[in-house]
Image (tube, grey):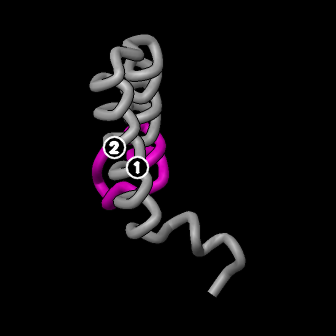
Amino acid sequence: MSRWSFLRSIWNYVFGLAMVTLYAVIFLHTRLYSDALLQVFFLRRANLWLVELVPRPRGCG
């Protein structure tokens, strides 16, 4: 097991998505719209990061 294996843990990704979603809901509820929009940016970046992290099957692009 490598020292970077924690980066590949799916649980880190799941809890990170839950945290960002919770913050977005809190910011929307308190009318902090710019902060809520920033959380959407973080959510989108997390999705791009996951796509880059997961290896592609052979024969795909």
Magenta-drawn stretch contains 58: yes
Circle 1 residues within 10 Å: few <14, some 14–19, many ≥20: few
List the single residue furthest toward the bottom: 1
Percent position (x, y) of residue 44?
Answer: 38, 31
List the single residue furthest toward the right: 3
Q: Quadrant of residue 14 in the image?
A: bottom left
Q: Which residues are magenta?
A: 47-60
List the single residue furthest toward the top: 34
Per the model, the C-alpha gap separating discs 2 and 1 is: 5 Å
Residue at screen point 44% across, 12% down: 34
What residue type is disc 1 on?
A: Met
Vertical position of residue 13 compared to residue 8: above or below: above
Dot label at residue 29: none
Percent position (x, y) of residue 60?
Answer: 29, 48
Percent position (x, y) of residue 39?
Answer: 42, 29
Q: Dot 2 corresponds to which residue?
A: 22
Q: Quadrant of residue 48 in the image?
A: top left
Residue at screen point 31% across, 60% down: 57
Residue at screen point 40% across, 49% down: 19
Image position of 6 (left or right of 4): left
Image position of 1 (left or right of 22): right
What residue type is disc 2 on?
A: Leu
Q: Return the residue nearer the eye: 28 or 51.
A: 28
Residue at screen point 50% across, 67% down: 8
Image position of 38 (left or right of 14): right
Dot label at residue 19: 1
Q: Secondary structure at mark 1?
A: helix
Q: Secondary structure at mark 2?
A: helix
Q: Are marks 2 and 1 in contact (CB under 8 Å)?
A: yes
